[in-house]
Amino acid sequence: MLPGQGHRHNAPRLESVNSEETVDVVLIGGGIMSATLGSLISQLEPDWSINVYERLGEVAQESSNAWNNAGTGHAALCELNYMPENADGTVSAAKAVSINEQFQVSRQYWAYLVSIGALPEPHNFINATPHMTFVKGRANIEYLRKRVEALRDEPLFPDMEYTEDLERIAEWTPLIAKKRNPRQKVAATRVESGTDVDFGALTKYLLSDLERRGASVQTNHQVTWLKRQKDGTWKLRVRHLVGQTPKVVRARFVFVGAGGGALALLQHSGIPEIKGFGGFPISGQFLRTTNPKVVAQHQAKVYGKAAVGAPPMSVPHLDTRVVDGETALLFGPFAGFTPKFLKTSTWFDLPFSIRLHNLGPMLQVGLKNFDLVKYLVSELLASRAKKMAALREFMPTAKDRDWELITAGQRVQVMKKDPEKGGVLQFGTEVITGADGTIAGLLGASPGASTAAPIMLDVLARCFPDRFVGWEPRLRQMIPSFGRELSIDPAAAEASLSETAKVLELTA
Ligand SMILES: Cc1cc2nc3c(=O)[nH]c(=O)nc-3n(C[C@H](O)[C@H](O)[C@H](O)COP(=O)(O)OP(=O)(O)OC[C@H]3O[C@@H](n4cnc5c(N)ncnc54)[C@H](O)[C@@H]3O)c2cc1C
C-alpha cells in the first residue's frame, strides 16, 4: 500500500508502468543507515512496500561491517575529541552531552526491538565494555581533570571515575599499566556503562527483520541511475551484478544510504541541494590480536588524545571487541589516503566526484588544511614498526607477533561550500534532503553508526513533516524519551540508562 493521506506529496497512486516494479520506498545500500530507516518505517507504516538494494553479495560489508569500524557505542564517555579545550582553556560539556543524548535514542530503539523479538538476544550485537580515557603528561592531565569537572553533574555521565594512580589503572586494565615507567605522569577515567557494538551483526538482524515484515532485500543489485519524474516519483535503474540484467523501479521515496557511494548518487539525482558538496576520503587500518592471553588482560575501550593535525576521529584507542561471539583487541585507527570512496570501489571516485560547483570549496579545503595533509602523509609513510610503537604507548608489552594489520572501512568526510571561508571540511554527518521530501541521503561518517536512530528520525521528520506528527505517539512507545532532553531531567536519564541496560543485558 502507498503512503497516501496526510502526505504532502500529491503524486498519484503508482501503477506498474511497462512492467516496472513500483514501491513506496527504495533504500539504496545495505548498511546500518538504510537498515535503521527501513526498520523505523516498517514500524510506523507496516503497509508501505520497501525495496533495499545492495551492490555487494552480502549486506553490511562496507563501513558497517564489524571489522571496518571500531564498534564503539559513541556516547562521548571516553572520546576526548567531543570535548576539546577552548582557546581560553575552558572545557565545555555541550557537544559530549548532545552525542550521549543521541546514543540514548539508539539504545532505546534497540531495546524496544529486543523487547518485541525483532532483534535477537542482545549479546549478539551489543556488549557492556567500560569506556576509559588515558593521558600522559601534565598538560593532558590538567585537561582531563577539567573534563571530569565539566561532566561531574551531567545526568547522562554518572559514575565517572578518575585516577592518577597507575595501580588503580592496572586494576581497571592491566595491559595499559604493565611495564610502564612508574615515574611517568598519567591519568585515566572510567565509566563502567560503556558499550561495544557489532554494527555489522546489528545491520544484518535489522534487515532480516525487515524482510520478515515483507520488505525485499536484494544483494548484488547496484543502483546505477535515478531520475525524478514529473509526477513526483523517482525512477531508478538497478543492475543485477551477477546476471548483468538491468531493471527499472519506481519509488515514491528514495533514501540514498550508500555510504561512500552516496555523493555520486545524490549528484546523479540532480537535486540542487547537493551543489557545493564534495567528499574527502580517509582510509584506515587497525592492529588486531586474538591471542587469548593478551585479550584476557584488557576489558575496556581506552581512548587517548589525538596527535597535532590529526582529524578528530583518528584518536588512538585500544579496544575490546566482541564479534561473532569471539573477543579480540583492536588498536588504531591509522589513517591513510586513497581516492576510493568505498573499500570495494575504484580510484576514480574522487576525480569523478569533482564538479564545477564543488571545485572551489574542495580547493579551499586543500589549501586550508595543511596540518591534516601533513598528518595523512606521515600516517601513509608510517611503517609497521612505527604503528607497533604507537601501540606500545598504550600497551608497553605489545609483541609484534601477536598483532596483525587489517584494513578498516573508508570514511568520506564532507567538504562543503562556506559563505565566509569558501570551503570547509567537516567531520560530522550531513543529511541532504530534496526540497519536496521525496529523496534524502547521508554524507559523512561521525559519530556514525551509534547515532543511526536519531539521524534517521531526522530524515523522517524532514521528508514526511505532515505524517510525522501522527507518528509521534508510536515513536514515544518505541523511544520513551522521544522529543525530550534527558540531560535536563536526571530522573528520566537514570530511568533510560537503567531500563535499556536491563533489556540489552549491559552488565560489565
Ligand atoms: C575506520 C572507521 C571506524 C569507525 N568507528 C565507528 C565507531 O566506533 N562507532 C560508530 O558508531 N561508528 C563508527 N564508524 C562510522 C560507521 O561505521 C558509519 O557511520 C556507518 O557504518 C555508515 O553506515 P552506512 O549505512 O551509511 O554506510 P555503509 O555501511 O558503508 O553502507 C553503504 C552500503 O551501500 C552500498 N552501496 C554503495 N553504492 C551503492 C549503489 N549504487 N547501489 C547499491 N548499493 C550501494 C555499499 O556497498 C554499502 O554496503 C567508523 C567508520 C570507520 C570507517
Image (spheres, helix red, strand yellow):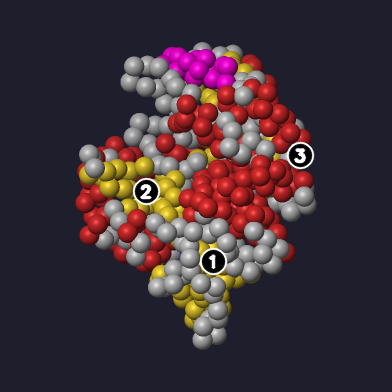
User: As shown in the figure, which amino acid type bears the numbered disc 3?
Assistant: Val
Q: Which mark is residue 487?
A: none
Q: Which residues are magenta?
A: 137-154
Asked whether disc 3 touches disc 1, contact meaning CB atoms under 8 Å apart, the reply is no
Q: Is residue 197 left or right of residue 507?
A: left
Residue drawn at point x = 55 percent, y = 85 percent: 19
Q: Nearer the viewer, residue 145 or 188?
A: 145
In this view, 413 is above or below 386: below
Specify few, some or many for label 2: CA neighbours under 10 Å numbering under 14, 14-19, or 20 or more.
many
In this view, 188 is above or below 449: above
148 magenta-colored? yes
Instruction: Give me the C-alpha separation between circle 3 and circle 1.
Output: 31 Å
The answer to which of marks 1 and 2 sits earlier in the sequence is: 1
Q: Which mark is residue 26?
A: 1
Q: Where is residue 280 drawn, in percent x and y? A: 35, 51
Q: Is residue 392 left or right of residue 329?
A: left
Q: Where is residue 110 drawn, in percent x and y? A: 68, 45
Specify few, some or many for label 3: CA neighbours under 10 Å numbering under 14, 14-19, or 20 or more.
some
